[in-house]
Amino acid sequence: MTVIGRSWGRLTLPGKVILAAIPILIALTAGLVAVIVVLGAPILDGLAANLPIVRFVLAATIILLMTIPTAFLIIYMEMKVIALMNLRIGPDRVGPFGSLLSVVHGLKVLMKEDFTPTGADSVVFTLAPVVTYLASVMTLLVIPFAPGLYGQDFNIGLLYFFAIGGLSVVGLLMAGWSSYNKYSLLGGLRSAAQVISYEIPLTLSVVGLILLAGTMSLNQIVLNQSGWFTDWYVFQQPLGVLIFFIAATAEANRTPFDLTEADSEIVAGFATEYSGMRFGFFFFAEYVNVFIVSALTVTLFFGGWNAPFPWPWPITLSLDPGGLGIGLLLLVTVVPLLLCIVFAVPLWIARPRIKTWHALVVGFVLANLFLVALVGAGAYIGLDWVAGVLWFMLKTYVFVFTFVWMRGTLPRVRIDQLMDFAWKWLLPASLLNLFVTAAAIVVVNR
Amino acid sequence: MTTTRAPSDDPRIELDRDLGVFEPVPPYPPRTEREAEFYTLGDGQMFINMGPQHPSTHGVLRVVLKLDGEKVVDLDPVLGYLHRGVEKLCENADYHQAICYTDPLEYVSSLFTEWSPVIAFEKLMDVQVPRRAEYIRVLSSELNRIASHALFLGWMALDLGGLTPILWSFIERDEIVDMLAALTGQRMLFNYFRIGGVNGDLNHEFMSRLGDWMSRATEHIEAGNGLLNENEIFVRRMRGLGTIDSKTALRMVMTGPNLRATGVPFDVRRAHPYSVFPELEFDIPTRAEGDCLARYLLRIDEIKQSLRIIDQCLHQMPDGPVMAKLPRLLRPRPGRAYAAVEGPRGQLSTYAVSDGTDQPFRMRIHDPSFIHLQAVGVMMPGNLIADTMAIMASLDPIMGGVDK
């Protein structure tokens, strides 16, 4: 007993915790295994019976998790791109080229004090960032990322998008009202005025597109645009895409329409009193919004996940690993070694005095790159969702870059100019677009 | 939303009821009719307190705005957060020491704030400044003017939400400031001018940096302005904003670019010439509109004129000493002297009274920022809250000079 007691006494606190946790973990695992063995089949049957629900829950989880790296990536991109435009270096300390800085920002935000000002309506104050963030994330549910890769294919997908997207302003208003701060109040009211004004041209600008597509399902709209890039709706709706993009910029509260958080006027607008992770949620929501707006622009007008041109040489890969037999073993063991040597040989020829193992290391790296490229190319050709995601992300990030570019270039408009622009220019223009589209459809179809 | 707080710890304030969220919180019982009128809210109005800690009040200025929605109805600037008692400090130092206290008045254009007391003291002592020293003064101060204006152009854009111009103009400013650091040994508060000359002759590093920079200065400044001058959003926001006519501007004793933007070609360098400015050729750019855009564009024109002056200085620079022969302890005869220079913000002047000791008996510093800040009361009412910052930035006040 004394031996055990002495050993226990030597352990540090984490050691004690871990040691105590081991039997508990073992018991839990055993219990889980038992439950799976006993109840596994019924559970699986139940899941199989409710496949749509399972699929929905999975998709929602994945999308919720996806927003975090997306926001990190866009924040990093914004820091770096604006730095280049400002002739600065930008982040370069954490990770390669500072790429982990936004992760560190996330951690910092988590660790900061979560402060509620005196006099604030604490319930509303706490709920506001949640509403804003969830409204952003929920819109992602209907966006098709690739063939078959979407959260839910509503037949009213576009309507759902605008309805839920408009909810984010409720969160901003709640934040503005509950903060007990006049700057916040001004920011919240500004955002309400702005979003309500720009919702109308935003919605009207896509009505022409709905007439053309004959559907409001985003998946179907993307399918309509398959083929060559000339089939994209941008060529049939040039005015529509312009109005949509401008109005979407205002919806996402981005420069030059970032009046709700105009730092030189109303400090930080609705987010003035927020700190810690509650501010982090607003911050996240903003960048997720940027992604969503870009994604929707791509989906509606730029062919979604369609490649700009169809793959000219149709290849069908029929890889059957079982059929290879002993060849599979060779493929796994010998081919990589051979590849290493094959890539190392030119080095020996070019520089005979190079050390053998140096050449082999370089050959190993090159062989790995080659294999990764090979697998990637195979996946691109063989799996249409890989190609779809690739094209979708490529196009989306072009628009994300455009948003960042605008932030680096343009000053901010004034609130009255903002309203003038929405009601006097964008609204008539979107009505004109709708009218012309409808007339063209009537003329062509007759 | 019924939480209440005592408005301040001031024991004089006794409120018999709880204050609502959007009710005014007067800083003290109103002492004047104006204050009583200002701190009474009309229907649907509210107060908002801008500063002293606000991202864009250019220092520690506090402005209480009376708002109707987003429209500014009235405003009450509250000064004094940066008061250091510079004049009193100068009066307790001897003539050499007094100069360095004037440096941080306008901390982005320190050479001018030290130039005007230096001229005043030289007048008190009847010192003849060597011509080379005068040329060096003009050269370095015009460089400083460009640095100050470059900073203004960037801040102007930043207060309208543009992120990039401030960093572009900081590049120009940094080059100039490095140059002046090579000449004077300091980047911001130079303390370079002395009674009877300057602290040191031109050196090799300064001249090589200057030559480098001059060869591409015009090009750089044009490139930086290309970002804003043709930007529709920027021009639309600035045009017709914060307009002031020449009569009002003159009655408010405005000087410098803010006055010249209303069409009055008043420049101390021409109106009351000092130093070697009569020998130099330069224009006085003016603009008729008197709005924020005019004030912005006028400063760009001034940068070009400053480049002209620097060019001429370099060509006409005579040889000779840079410091007059002076006793170590200066005791001017009793008397008074006034000297004004044209700073980047307007007329900077010093009125010095000597009582025969080695310290100035009285030193009064007139700073243009303070005068221009008064114009805010004329320009702002009726504009939107977003424009308050644009107007403030276009007047280019430096709080170090306002509060002294």
Image (tube, rainbow, N blue to C red):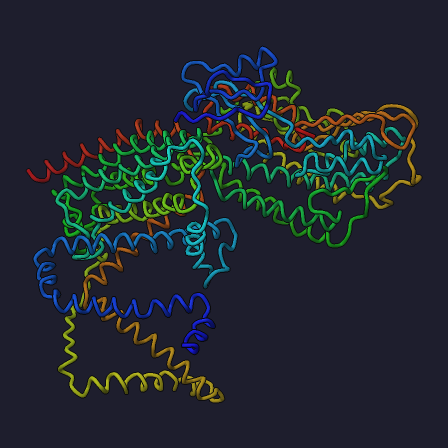
Residue A307 position (above or below residue B26): below
Name the residue: 81% across, 47% down: B200
With respect to residue B44, does A141 lie above or below? below
Q: Position of residue A210 (x, y in %)?
A: 16, 40
B273 relative to A35, above or below: above
Quick one: quadrant of the N terminus of chain A?
Answer: bottom left
Name the spot of residue B142 as percent of width and height, x first: 70, 39
Q: Is residue B231 visible?
A: no
Quadrant in which residue B258 is drawn: top right
Image quarter hosting the C terminus of chain A:
top left
Q: Is residue B320 left or right of residue B261?
A: right
Residue A26 point in image, percent of width and height? 27, 70
> Farthest front residue?
A1
Q: Is residue A289 visible?
A: yes
In this picture, is B312 found above or below B364? Answer: below
A82 relative to B209 in the view: left or right: left
> Percent x, y for residue B194?
82, 39
The one nearer the camera, A116 or A227, is: A116
The residue positioned farthest toward the top in the image shown: B33
Name the residue at the left extreme.
Answer: A446
Q: Position of B351 compared to B211: left or right?
A: right
Between residue A149 and residue A177, name the one nearer to us.
A177
Would residue B31 be found to the left or right of residue B343 on screen? Answer: left
> A89 or A303, which lies in front?
A89
Numbered label tally? 0
Residue at point 15%, 52% (across, down): A223
